[in-house]
Image: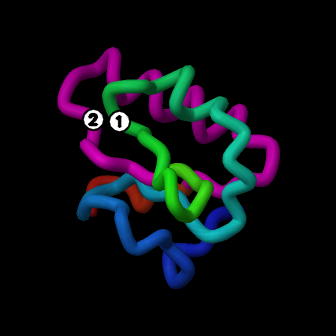
């Protein structure tokens, strides 16, 4: 399970985030490309835009559920 205390620094504020467990597998970027991107120099993903539509939210949840190392977190409606 993702650790909110271990979020990658590049994540924008909001309910979804990626922590340091990310192994750069590309699943989240393929599943929700409008919300996840890659820190090229560091080799991991982060949330660059929080979801704004139901479709984007569904894609972020799908990415979170499919993450092989559970590096994507959801803090609810914070």
Quadrant assignment, res 62: top right
Residue placed furthest toward the top: 55
Element type at mark 2: loop
Q: Is residue 10 left or right of residue 63?
A: left
Residue placed furthest toward the bottom: 5
> Within 10 Å of the Cα at label 1, are there few (<14), some (14-19), or many (20+) other Cα atoms?
many
Residue 8, percent across and down? 48, 70
Residue placed furthest toward the right: 68
Residue 62: say if magenta: yes
> Residue 1, labelled with which disc?
none
| Residue identifier under label 1 | 35
Q: Which residues are magenta?
A: 46-72
Residue 75: say if magenta: no
- Give the vertical position of 46 relative to 20 (above or below): above
Quadrant assignment, res 10: bottom left
Which residue corresponds to the image point at 74% horizontal and 53% vertical from the top-left?
23
Image marks 1 and 2: residues in contact by CB distance under 8 Å: yes
Q: For marks 1 and 2, give the CA distance.
A: 6 Å
Element type at mark 1: loop
Which residue corresponds to the image point at 30% horizontal and 48% vertical from the top-left?
48
Which residue corresponds to the image point at 48% horizontal and 46% vertical from the top-left?
38
Q: Is residue 57 left or right of residue 74?
A: left
> Within 10 Å of the Cα at label 2, are there few (<14), some (14-19), or many (20+) other Cα atoms?
many
| Residue identifier under label 2 | 51
Residue 74 visible in the current orientation? no
Q: Nearer the viewer, residue 35 or 14?
A: 35
Label located before the other in sequence (1 or 2): 1
Residue 25, percent across and down? 72, 39
Residue placed furthest toward the front: 41
């Amino acid at each position: 399970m993702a650790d909110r205390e271990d979020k990658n620094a590049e994540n924008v504020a909001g309910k979804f985030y990626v922590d340091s467990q990310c192994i750069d597998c590309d699943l989240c970027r393929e599943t929700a490309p409008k919300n996840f991107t890659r820190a090229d120099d560091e080799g991991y993903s982060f949330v660059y835009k929080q979801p704004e539509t139901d479709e984007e939210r569904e894609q972020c949840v799908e990415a979170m559920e499919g993450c092989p190392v559970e590096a994507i977190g959801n803090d609810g409606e914070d």
